[in-house]
Amino acid sequence: MSPLADHDRTQVDDIIDRWGGDAEFAVEILQEIQARFRHLPQAALERVSERTRADMGRLYHIATFFKAFSLKPRGRVPIQVCTGTACHVQGSARVLDAFSRELRVRPGESTADLEFSLDGVRCLGCCGLAPVVTIGDELVGGVDSSKVARLLRKPRKPGAQPRAKESRDA
């Protein structure tokens, strides 16, 4: 376990302080830490435990139970391929395989440079646009495996607002 750098420790402490150092808000505290670091560093979990008096077992239970959390660093640009029924019928398995090949990672992993993480998810709630993919904040519908390489090359602005787009425009 590597200790938190002073700057990172200050950020974790600020997050804990915003929630009053109360262990009842462990999920919310971990959500903010996840958003800041793109994963839950061991040292951050230990700091939360120390400052809130939350049991480490409880923190690990939360961190491993909820899919939104990761104990491993995640990519700057998350990619989610919907594998729900409508998307599956329209070929989302081929789309997920194409992303996996292009990025050279399996679902649930991140690229070595931490630029991208890839996940298959059960439903993105846009069945009429199947198959659907989110790349960062962008929702792309009608994706087929032949469009994956071009979608990955597309420049992305940090903090862009979510918008739906048909893959024909990608």
Image (cartoon, rainbow, N blue to C red):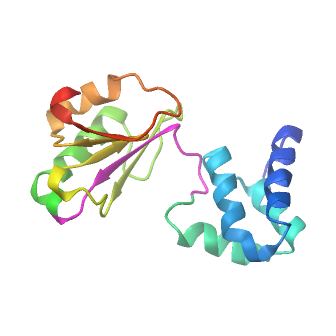
Residue 94 spot, x, y in % from top left: 17, 47
Q: Can residue 37 be seen in this snapshot?
A: yes
**Foreground: 168 or 66?**
168
Residue 45 spot, x, y in % from top left: 76, 61
As drawn, 103 above or below 134: above
**Foreground: 73 or 11?**
11
Q: Residue at x 79, y 74 (%)?
A: 23
Residue 169 spot, x, y in % from top left: 19, 27
Question: Could you say which quadrant of the image residue 83 lies in?
Answer: bottom left
As drawn, 153 above or below 97: above
Q: Does residue 156 appear left or right of residue 25 in this picture?
A: left
Location of the C terminus by quadrant is top left
Q: Does residue 106 appear left or right of residue 14 in this picture?
A: left
Q: Does residue 58 appear left or right of residue 116 in this picture?
A: right
Q: Can residue 40 be seen in this snapshot?
A: no
Count of numbered circles in the view: 0
**Foreground: 44 or 134?**
134
Q: Residue at x 17, y 65 (%)?
A: 85
Q: Residue furthest left?
A: 89
Question: Could you say which quadrant of the image residue 117 lies in?
Answer: top left
Residue span colored magenta: 70-85
| 132 in magenta | no
**Foreground: 45 or 87?**
87
Q: Residue at x 40, y 41 (%)?
A: 162
| 73 in magenta | yes
Residue 167 spot, x, y in % from top left: 19, 34
